[in-house]
Image: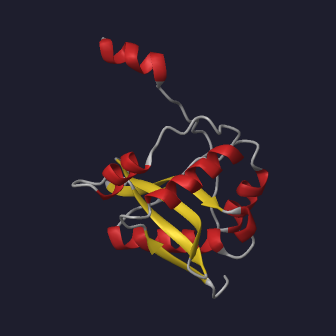
């Protein structure tokens, strides 16, 4: 890891940088128009009265270059919380500098501080470089588990009964 990389918890005032990296990640994932978050919605959800979403920001020479955005989940089997990593992003010019590893180290420390049993996340099936990186950390795919989602019209129909 580069000595130039520092990681810190996100604080109020970071919303624009967080949103910039969310949009950059969506663009990388071929969904640039999917982002509906705003500075205001991030401020409320992350730094409001009862935050449910958290983030760590990696900086190089004082400039934000990486993001780990996460929330707590729960395992009935372990009886403990876990961390669900929703987004991991590193600016293109900061890749291969140890930024993603530094974010994971800090996320692991956060999990330890909170007594979490694990860190979970999803990776796109075409993102081989990400899978190789995660494997280098000692992570493994959750074999036998398949991600599912209820959203949009189906979610609205379910809510309507």
Q: Give percent across and percent down for residue 35.
A: 54, 39
Say above or below: 50 vs 67. above
Left or right of 12 on screen, residue 127: right
Q: Answer left or right for 83 relative to 26.
A: left
Q: Which residue is at 45% across, 56% downward?
A: 70
Image location (x, y in percent) of residue 120? 51, 53
Residue 52 appears anywhere in the view: no
Give me the residue at 51% from left, 53% from top.
Answer: 19
Colour convention: secondary structure
Of the pair 161 and 152, the residue shown nearer to us: 152
Which quadrant of the structure image shows residue 3?
A: bottom right
Q: Residue at x 56, y 51 (%)?
A: 22
Q: Position of residue 60 (x, y in %)?
A: 62, 78
Closer to us: 132 or 15: 15
Q: Indicate the quadrant containing the N terminus: top left, top right, bottom left or bottom right.
A: bottom right
Q: Residue at x 33, y 68 (%)?
A: 114
Residue 53 placement (x, y as % from top left): 38, 53
Number of numbered discs: 0
Identify the residue at the far left of this view: 49
Question: 15 and 155: which one is in front?
Answer: 15
- From the viewer's perspective, tell me whether residue 132 is left or right of residue 161: right
Q: Is residue 153 above or below residue 128?
A: above
Q: Which quarter of the rendering shows the C terminus?
A: top left
Visible in this render: residue 140?
Answer: yes
């Amino acid at each position: 890891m580069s000595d130039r990389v520092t990681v810190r918890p996100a604080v109020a005032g970071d919303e624009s940088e967080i949103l910039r990296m969310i949009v950059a990640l969506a663009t990388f994932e071929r969904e640039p128009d999917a982002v509906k978050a705003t500075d205001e919605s991030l401020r409320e959800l992350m730094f409001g009265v009862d935050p449910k979403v958290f983030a760590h920001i990696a900086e190089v020479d004082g400039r934000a270059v990486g993001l780990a955005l996460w929330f707590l989940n729960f395992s009935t089997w372990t009886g403990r919380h876990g961390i669900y990593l929703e987004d991991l992003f590193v600016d293109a010019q900061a890749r291969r500098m140890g930024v993603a590893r530094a974010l994971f180290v800090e996320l692991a420390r956060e999990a330890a501080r909170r007594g979490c049993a694990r860190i979970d996340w999803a990776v796109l099936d075409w993102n081989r470089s990400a899978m190789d990186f995660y494997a280098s950390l000692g992570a493994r795919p959750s074999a036998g588990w398949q991600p599912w989602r209820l959203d949009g019209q189906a979610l609205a129909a379910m809510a309507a009964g």
